[in-house]
Image (cartoon, helix red, strand yellow):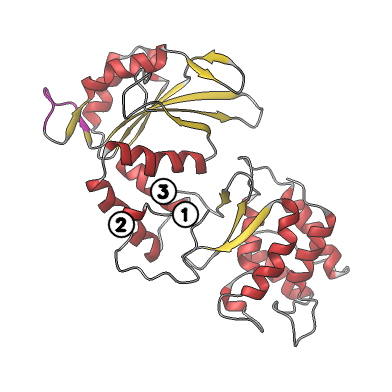
């Protein structure tokens, strides 16, 4: 990711706080405070005594050169720098939502096709305007959740209890996989079962080497178990066995390259639990090559990933009495 030097100098000026005290929306940072700023952003850069603005611009350029994945994203360290720069606790000569500072930052970022915005958690994020992709500073689904994230997780869990299979696909899975960096995320005729061939969704993922992997996805609304017969609200793993074989064996047409290709991996997704017995049964039925192509994803995986990627909840999952505030802009 490369930013123009002019953009880097403007952002560096904001970090340094090189404005008159009466009109500045950013606090002034001397040499030691610049070192402290980048330490708080989880980097190891220390100011060397040179001209502050030029040093910060050079440092931002190094951060942007860090390896990262995903189209329309910046390195997580750069997202952390922006979040720290726009911390609401540093409000200066501005309203409580830092509208003046946000306007200045977006005037610089627009040149690079990005936009900064505040999400409901009052943290500043970066959105790529062309792809509508948000760069989240941390996407580890196994980290401890904040109180606000726990509340969002519970709201989404309650939504999954009543959502249909089509709702699970359209409102949850499609936005989630798009945000995770998958391309061509396409629902395969689930409502009318036309041309589905064992998969509800197909998509592709571009590796850093520019090689492409293709994925199929079969979704079930509720618990997936290995009982002898299908029970109310549960799905039997035997029901999806043939669907998995069809998914792996049937070609899909990729219009971007005008070729038919086979699916490399198959996601088995359940809005409820996927029991160990169900995983073991399906693994025993498939041969070694096919087993390596299966990826299981159950309710907890969906909830954790949805929360850490900071996706907006489906409208039906939001509390009815919610009052919109300036912080309530969707994450992307």
Q: Examine the structure image and report whether residue 133 is included in the region drawn in magenta.
A: no
Q: Examine the structure image and report whether residue 230 is included in the region drawn in magenta.
A: yes
As measured in the structure, the alpha-carbon distance from the residue carrying label 3 to the one carrying label 1 is 7 Å
Q: Residue at x 54, y 24 (%)?
A: 213
Going from N to C along the chain, the mark reached first, 2 or 3, is 2
Residue beneath label 2, please? 155
Going from N to C along the chain, the mark reached first, 2 or 1, is 2
Q: Are marks 2 and 3 in contact (CB under 8 Å)?
A: no
Q: Residue furthest right?
A: 50
Q: Residues within 10 Å of mark 2 (few under 14, many from 20)?
A: some
Q: Which image quarter is the N terminus in?
A: top right
Residue beneath label 3, please? 306
As measured in the structure, the alpha-carbon distance from the residue carrying label 2 to the one carrying label 1 is 14 Å
Image side of residue 71 versus residue 193, left or right = right
Residue beneath label 1, please? 310
As measured in the structure, the alpha-carbon distance from the residue carrying label 2 to the one carrying label 3 is 12 Å
User: What is the x, y in percent for residue 74?
Assistant: 66, 49
Q: Are marks 2 and 1 in contact (CB under 8 Å)?
A: no
Q: Residue at x 66, y 27 (%)?
A: 210
Which mark, by number, is residue 60? none
Q: Residue at x 63, y 57 (%)?
A: 79
Q: What range is drawn magenta here? A: 224-231
Q: Residue furthest bottom?
A: 22
Q: Quadrant of residue 229?
A: top left
Is most of the magenta stretch helix, strand or loop?
loop
Please tell me whether residue 288 is drawn above or below residue 126 in the rendered image: above
Looking at the rendered structure, the secondary structure element under dot 3 is helix
Image side of residue 225 versus residue 243, left or right = left
Looking at the rendered structure, the secondary structure element under dot 1 is loop
317 or 289: which is nearer to us?
Answer: 317
48 or 127: which is nearer to us?
Answer: 127
């Amino acid at each position: 990711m490369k930013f123009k030097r002019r953009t880097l100098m403007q952002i560096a000026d904001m970090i340094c706080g090189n404005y008159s005290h009466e009109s500045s929306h950013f606090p002034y940072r001397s040499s030691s405070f610049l070192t402290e700023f980048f330490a708080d952003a989880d980097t190891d850069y220390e100011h060397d005594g040179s001209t502050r603005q030029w040093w910060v611009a050079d440092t931002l350029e190094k951060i942007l050169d860090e390896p990262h994945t995903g189209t329309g994203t910046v390195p997580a360290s750069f997202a952390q720098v922006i979040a720290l720069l726009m911390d609401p606790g540093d409000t200066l000569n501005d309203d409580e939502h830092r509208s003046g500072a946000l306007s200045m930052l977006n005037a610089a970022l627009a040149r690079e096709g990005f936009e900064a915005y505040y999400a409901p958690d009052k943290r500043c994020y970066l959105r790529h305007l062309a792809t509508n992709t948000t760069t989240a500073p941390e996407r580890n689904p196994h980290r401890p959740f904040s109180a606000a994230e726990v509340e969002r997780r519970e709201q989404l869990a309650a939504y999954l209890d009543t959502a249909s299979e089509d709702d699970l696909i359209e409102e949850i899975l499609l936005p989630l996989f798009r945000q995770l960096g998958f391309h061509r995320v396409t629902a395969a005729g689930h409502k009318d079962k036309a041309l589905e061939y064992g998969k509800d969704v197909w998509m592709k993922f571009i590796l850093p080497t520019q090689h492409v992997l293709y994925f199929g996805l079969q979704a079930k609304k509720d618990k997936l178990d290995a009982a002898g017969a299908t029970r109310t609200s549960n799905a039997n793993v035997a029901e999806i066995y043939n669907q998995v074989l069809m998914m792996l064996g049937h070609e899909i047409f990729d219009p971007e390259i005008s070729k038919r290709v086979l699916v490399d991996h198959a996601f088995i997704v359940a809005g409820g639990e996927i029991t160990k017995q169900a995983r073991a049964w399906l693994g025993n039925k498939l041969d070694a090559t096919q087993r390596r192509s299966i990826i299981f994803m159950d309710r907890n995986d969906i909830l954790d990933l949805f929360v850490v990627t900071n996706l907006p909840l489906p409208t039906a999952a939001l509390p009815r009495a919610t009052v919109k505030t300036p912080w309530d802009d969707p994450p992307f």
